[in-house]
Image: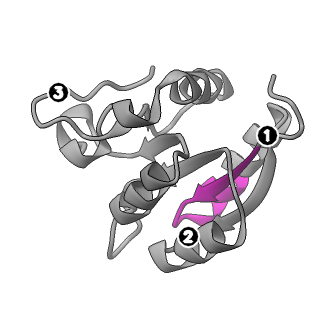
């Protein structure tokens, strides 16, 4: 369980999944600063708040969240990616950030968050030859 002072943002283009994610992280003790359905909305959120974590869906319909992830990395914000992609389809740009495949459980989300918080910011940058790791 995280301290109540821990805050995050959720970037997910499917409203029901976004609501579920927000409920789950609140149950884990996090405060949700806001949610975004598009990369543009996510950049606005990042301009308005200082989250300690970002949960990003990789595919946002017509775009991806990879530029948002880059902005988070520049600010030292840990990332958890959620995705419907299979491990071999996850873009290399995701780096070593935890990948949480949909559908997922509250426990796998909790483990992914813990893993993201344990990774040094420089470690989340995408290495050119590293394998993608998913969190079960």
**How many badges with numbers are in the image?**
3
Tell me, yes or no, if residue 101 can be seen here: yes
Determine the CA span between mark 2 and mark 3.
27 Å
According to the image, label 2 marks what residue?
42
According to the image, label 3 marks what residue?
130
Residue at x 25%, y 43% (from the top left corner) = 90
Residue 69's place in the image compared with 120, above or below, is: below
Q: Residues within 10 Å of mark 2 (few under 14, many from 20)?
A: many
Q: Position of residue 127 (x, y in %)?
A: 19, 35
Q: 108 and 67: which one is in front? A: 67
Q: Quadrant of the C terminus?
A: top left
Find residue 12 and report its image quarter.
bottom right
Q: Secondary structure at mark 3?
A: loop
Label 2 close to label 3 by CB (< 8 Å): no
**Numbered badge on residue 6:** 1
Asked whether, in this view, residue 10 is left or right of residue 70, the answer is right
Q: Position of residue 76 (x, y in %)?
A: 52, 45
Q: Position of residue 24 (x, y in %)?
A: 75, 39
Residue at x 55%, y 64% (from the top left corner) = 14
């Amino acid at each position: 369980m995280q301290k109540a002072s821990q805050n995050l943002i959720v970037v997910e283009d499917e409203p029901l999944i976004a609501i579920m994610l927000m409920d789950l992280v609140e149950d884990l003790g996090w405060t949700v600063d806001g949610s975004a359905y598009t990369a543009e909305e996510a950049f606005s959120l990042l301009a308005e708040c200082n989250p300690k974590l970002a949960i990003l869906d990789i595919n946002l319909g017509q775009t991806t969240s990879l530029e948002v992830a880059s902005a988070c990395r520049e600010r030292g914000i840990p990332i958890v990616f959620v995705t419907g992609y299979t491990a071999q389809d996850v873009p290399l740009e995701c780096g070593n950030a935890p990948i949480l495949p949909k559908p997922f459980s509250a426990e796998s989300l909790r483990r992914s968050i813990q893993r993201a918080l344990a990774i040094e910011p420089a470690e989340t940058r995408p290495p050119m030859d590293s394998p993608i790791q998913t969190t079960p």
